[in-house]
Amino acid sequence: MTSMTKSMADTGRRIAVIGGGAAGMMAAVRAAEAGACVTLFERNDRLGKKLRITGKGRCNLTNDCDREEFLRNVPTNPRFLYTALSAFSTEDTKTFFEGLGVPLKTERGKRVFPVSDRAADVVHALETACRRMGVQIVNRRVRRILAQDGAVCGIEVGAEELCFDAVILCTGGKSYPLTGSDGDGYRMARELGHTVTRLCPSLVPLVTEGTLCASMQGLSLKNVTLRVRDTEKHKYVFEDFGEMMFTHFGLTGPLVLSASAHLSDISRGRYEAEIDLKPALDERMLDARLRSDFDKYKNRDLINSLDDLLPQKMIEPFVSLCEIDPRKKIHSVTREERARMVQTLKRLRIPLATFRPLDEAIVTRGGIDVREVRPGSMESKLIKGLYFAGEILDVDAYTGGFNLQIAFSTAVLAADAAAEQE
């Protein structure tokens, strides 16, 4: 087994960081700042490939909230993150990136973005910090983590075995596999005895029952309210206001991605989407609006009188849902039929079938079982000198910058512990 360089054998703890994404780059910078000799391994030809496309290329870095509010936005194992968020808070993330020359801004929902709206600026800042701190960047795939007598002793890269005192595993989940997140880290952890919980998509488009969505494919809705109802427990599990879109398979868009994180054990018929197309109007006001439009178009067929109320692509499916003859004259529409229209405008119900595939998800739900990881250091309880950070852990959050903050906080905690361990 060999060292990467002579200097690594002579100075500082030798740390291998596997994965050059958000968690990996942060861990590399932090460990190098603590005096460790760090090598960052990234299988792609450049760092931060997935980070470059987050937030539609804008990169929602964190959320400007306190720790308790943050943890309320983490549905999976939130208390495991208590120490990590205490060690490196959302405020620390903002300070860190502004210190790297990335000015930030806060938008609706306390979401923090670079002022430039360019994820590439975030990647560039992290990569520049790595190089400035002397991190050696190696664009090669790590095949295995080597351990002896219950402790890390190195890694296998190609045909080489390289000596390291500690390894920080930051390979992400299985979402967006073309960016390199293909589950390699789970395999390496399993080989060392770790348990990987069930993997499924989160922050992902939703497949719906029936053909309604396909009939409106490509139609975007703005300023609507989306609720998702658990039909088994007879309660709403999600409600928010914003944008969404109909597709050939079902629903997507910001509201839908957020909703998906609230759906556990999805199965056909359990959950139902409910769209309020006119949230600014209550039913009485909406009925008055309909009567006003009907008066305006009283000599037209119903199908030709709704352009002021609905997008053109939605009119025919909407009338069909209301079970009214589309060629019925406006002056013949009954009070009961008008009431059905109001009900449908306020509660357009669409049964949900399942998630889209994991490779279309923004985040992977599931990962390394946190019961096998020390929450105060992110070190494995099974293998001394092995640390985890980021999406590889069985911790995930809602949209709004929470998942990237988890990556940064767990990376800092892991790096500090790895650099200081004796």
Image (cartoon, rainbow, N blue to C red):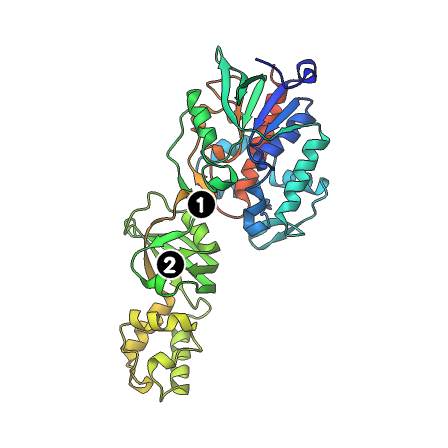
Q: Residue 303 appears at what percent x and percent y? A: 35, 79
Can I make out residue 138 in this image? yes
Badge 2 amino acid: His
Can I make out residue 237 in this image? no
Residue 95 occupies quadrant: top right
Q: Which residue of the protein is positioned furthest toward the bottom in this rendering? A: 299
Instruction: Tell me how far mark 2 sits from mark 1, CA to CA.
Output: 17 Å
Identify which residue, 294 or 161, lies in the foreground.
161
Circle 2 SS class: loop
User: Where, quadrant-wise, is the C terminus in this rendering?
Assistant: top right
Identify which residue, 262 or 211, lies in the foreground.
211
Q: Is residue 141 above or below residue 179?
A: above
Q: Which of pointers 2 and 1 lies earlier in the amino acid sequence? A: 2
Question: Disc number at residue 361?
Answer: 1
Q: Residue 45 appears at what percent x and percent y? A: 59, 36
Q: Is residue 54 left or right of residue 30?
A: left
Determine which residue is flagged by label 2.
248
Q: How many marks?
A: 2
Q: Is residue 377 above or below residue 239?
A: above
Q: Is residue 373 above or below residue 309?
A: above
Question: Disc number at residue 79?
Answer: none
Identify which residue, 38 or 3, lies in the foreground.
3
Badge 1 amino acid: Ala
User: Where, quadrant-wise, is the N terminus in this rendering?
Assistant: top right
Q: Residue at x 61, y 34 (%)?
A: 25
